[in-house]
Image (spheres, rainbow, N blue to C red):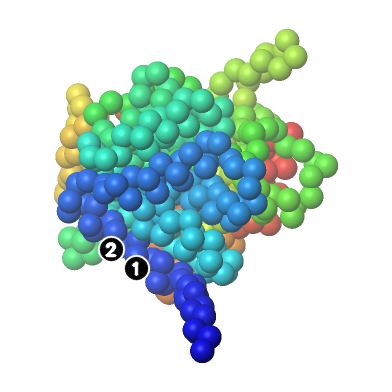
Amino acid sequence: MVPAVKRPRSRKCLTSAEAWERLERVAHRLRTTGRLGTRDSKQASAAFSLLNHPSESTSHDKYRQFLDLVLQNCGPQAVRLCAVALGQNNVRDMKMAHRRELISKLGEEQHRTLINQSFPNLQGDTEAAALLKDNHSSGSENLRISPTSEGVISENGGVDIASASTYRMNLEPELFHDDGIHGQTLIYHHRERLSFEDPTEHIPSCRGYRDLTKPHAQDDSQENSDITNTQEIFEHASIDGIAAVFKGLICGAIRTTSVHVNGITRSTASVTTVFPPWGAVDCLLSLDIWETSVEPLAMALFNATVKWVKESLHIGFTRGTSLTIPNSEVTLKGVHDEAIVQVFGSEIQQAINQSSIRIQEMEKGKLMTECVSMIITEKGAIISLSLGLVQGLEIRKKLYT
């Protein structure tokens, strides 16, 4: 009698929901135990090694592309979490649609401390940490960490992932309803050190990510469809472009810098436009604000006063309520349409209303939008605007001429 041949059990493909549950479970475990096991460390190290040194084998392509997109949208901590919780086989076997949904979910939940935990001094993670450090130092041209990420930009331009923790507070409607702040959110980031050597190099409200293309000025030869397939970044807007796009209080508040091109020095505005390939954001416009303009803009947009006293930031609201936050950065969100028009002009307001995020907000009946955020630092502020794709493309053409 011929013995029956045992067929290998087929592996069930994870859905995006099942993958997300695994991420949450592993995040809870790592946060509780404070250490990586041997298998965890190997998977994390393999993931960073694959990002740093892409394999010639096509069998790793799906996993590497997935990790690249996670890095772009959510930063290196999310890469490590996905590597530990899912691993290459599970990611590779997932359907493309479910991988996309998972990346989008990670982008939406990126501010959760549980999901994007820094795990300082996590035992068993030395190899992955070394690879991550090499990745930041050797790829500094194509890797950027924003001020909103858990990583802290250190004095030498590298990233100190282990020295920051994040807190999020929703302002209570019952406490602030007289001020019209219902729906506003305040996020603040505790940091041990922070140094901005070149303010034009920061792209806020996007987690640490790797550019698929280098930052450049506008290239009219590219089709619009290309922008949605790769990470497109445009920097150093023209002064004439700023005047053409912005009509409100923001004029004169945007930091300017000198750029040397072919032996010619010209003044440009510190405005960065990003077209992320995945996630809910269609187009992100980031404005670097002079320190002297922070207070009037915070009042105009959020009806709030802001003031640094030594190393503490004091935020006050018209009702009399105030917050004092030591040694922190603050992100304010939640703005009315009227304030957007007053500060930025009608073109920006219309572009915001056409963004995917704003459309979802309006469907839910939200009067205030989180498409406008303001990160306040000791050096000034970064204002981020989430725009619709079509309108963002038109604004890009005006800014980078």
Residue at position x 18%, y 34% in the image: 326
> Dividing the picture into quarters, in which one does residue 308 lie?
top left
Residue extending furthest front?
1
Label 1 amino acid? Glu
Element marked by disc 1: helix
Q: Residue at x 17, y 53 (%)?
A: 32
Q: Identify which residue is drawn at 60% across, 17% down.
A: 258
Q: Amino acid at mark 2?
A: Arg
Tags 1 and 2 in contact by the CB under 8 Å rule?
A: yes
Q: Which mark is residue 336?
A: none
Left or right: where does residue 160 sit relative to residue 364? left
In this rendered view, identify the residue nearer to me: 6 or 44: 6
In the rendered view, would you say 129 is above or below 94?
A: above
- Calculate the distance from the C-alpha at mark 1 to the C-alpha at mark 2: 6 Å
Q: Position of residue 277 (x, y in %)?
A: 60, 53
In percent of width and height, residue 292 lies at: 39, 27
Q: Residue 276: x, y in percent?
A: 58, 50
| Position of the C terminus by quadrant | top right
Residue that carries the numbered disc 2 in the rendered image: 25
Q: Is residue 306 left or right of residue 78?
A: left
Specify whether residue 313 is in view.
no
Residue on which disc 1 sits: 21
Compared with 133, 364 (above or below) is: below
Element assignment for label 2: helix
Total numbered labels: 2
Depth check, front residue: 118 or 205: 118
- Residue 158 seen anywhere in this rendered image of the structure: yes
Residue drawn at the location 33% of the way across and 41% of the way down = 150
Q: Which quadrant would residue 219 be assigned to in this image?
A: top right
From what the image shows, is residue 324 above or below residue 61?
above
Could you classify mark 2 by the number of other residues whose Cα lies within 10 Å: few (under 14), some (14-19), or many (20 or more)?
some
Residue at the far right: name it.
221
